[in-house]
Amino acid sequence: MTATTLPQLTSARPFLTDGGLETTLVYVNEIDLPDFAAFPLLDSDEGRGAMRSYYDPYLDLAEDQGVGFVFDTPTWRASLDWGARRGFDAIRLAAINRRAVEFVAALAAERPGLQAIVNGVIGPRGDGYIVGSAMSAAEAAAHHGLQARAFAEAGAEMISAVTMTYADEAIGITRAADAVSLPAVISLTVETDGRLPSGQTLGDAIAQIDTAAPTAPAYYMVNCAHPTHFIDHLDASAGWAGRIRGVRANASTMSHAELDAATELDRGDIAELADTYAQLDEVLDLRVIGGCCGTDHEHVRTVYDRLAGGRVGR
């Protein structure tokens, strides 16, 4: 599959994806996830059962609505540094990334009427809220290459870099995806001022990534931020805004720092979240709809219903 043949970009209706996997498992299912790493759950029957139960309502929703589904692997923390913290060496880590692809592909295969795209997820080397020690693009390509190769070997159809805090890491992941001939999607996160944690604007980051990557990303997304944090910074007339085709927003309007210090789940105002997605859709023509921290299938269903209603007659 190539960037030009990804079905979510040509579908008459937007594809769905899931919500806040880690926050649901931790705060709703009360499963301990050190470092917010869900991938170790693949090593046990109980863990796989918990993830199946998590994904099922989203798959039900996509089936009910007759729309496609971008099926993310639970591998946001399954990279070299984070894997080592969880006791996974490179060999074992590559194996569990492959199993993650196989796991979601098997769940999708149980629903033959559902058009599901298996998406290998790569998270940041840092914590996702701050840049920390930045890598060059070449260093990022080397660091994240293990996951990209594992995804390709296991049959993933695309790769997404999720919660990117600065451009060079995103460029490196795009290069790693290109090296294994998979289309890449870059999902950037922003602070309450609409800028990446690096301080760069969304427009400047997208322009830098598009220019520096050997093959430009298929499209961009924004995740782990509430729409109110960046909607006023979007310019519908700017070419870069048209490159953003998906949003996985947080339920909460809190800043990253506030969320990091929170001890309880903030599910936010679901109706307000849906309304702000509809406002985004007027600017961005969203092709992929999902959620991030604090969201669950109720949020995604409400957002989808709001967007579907708003598109009538468009």
Image: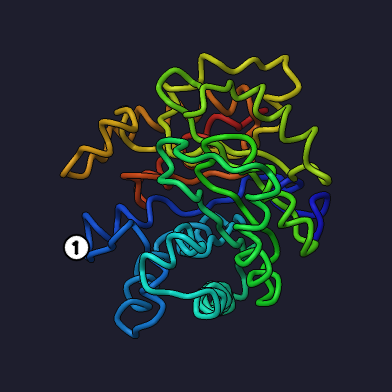
Measured along the vertical axis of the image, is residue 179 above or below residue 90? Answer: above
- Residue type of the residue flagged with mark 1: Glu
Q: Secondary structure at mark 1?
A: loop
Give the x, y percent position of residue 36: 33, 57
Q: Which residue is mark 1?
A: 30
Question: Residue 154, how many percent across, how many down?
Answer: 65, 77
In the visual, does 152 lie left or right of 61?
right
For the point 62% across and 22% down, which residue is it? Answer: 283
Q: Position of residue 171 (x, y in %)?
A: 69, 42
Expressed as whole percent of the image width and height from the top left, the position of residue 126 reads 45, 46
The residue lying at 42 percent from left, 33 percent from top is 225
**Outermost residue, bottom side:** 45
Q: Residue at x 38, y 51 (%)?
A: 20
Assign the N terminus to one quadrant of the image.
Answer: bottom right
Q: To which quarter of the image does residue 84 belong?
A: bottom left
Quarter of image, res 121:
bottom right
Residue 220 left/right relative to 165? right
Q: Is residue 203 above or below residue 59?
A: above
User: Coloured how?
Assistant: rainbow
Classify 10 Å Cα crowding around label 1: few (below 14), some (14-19), many (20 and above): few
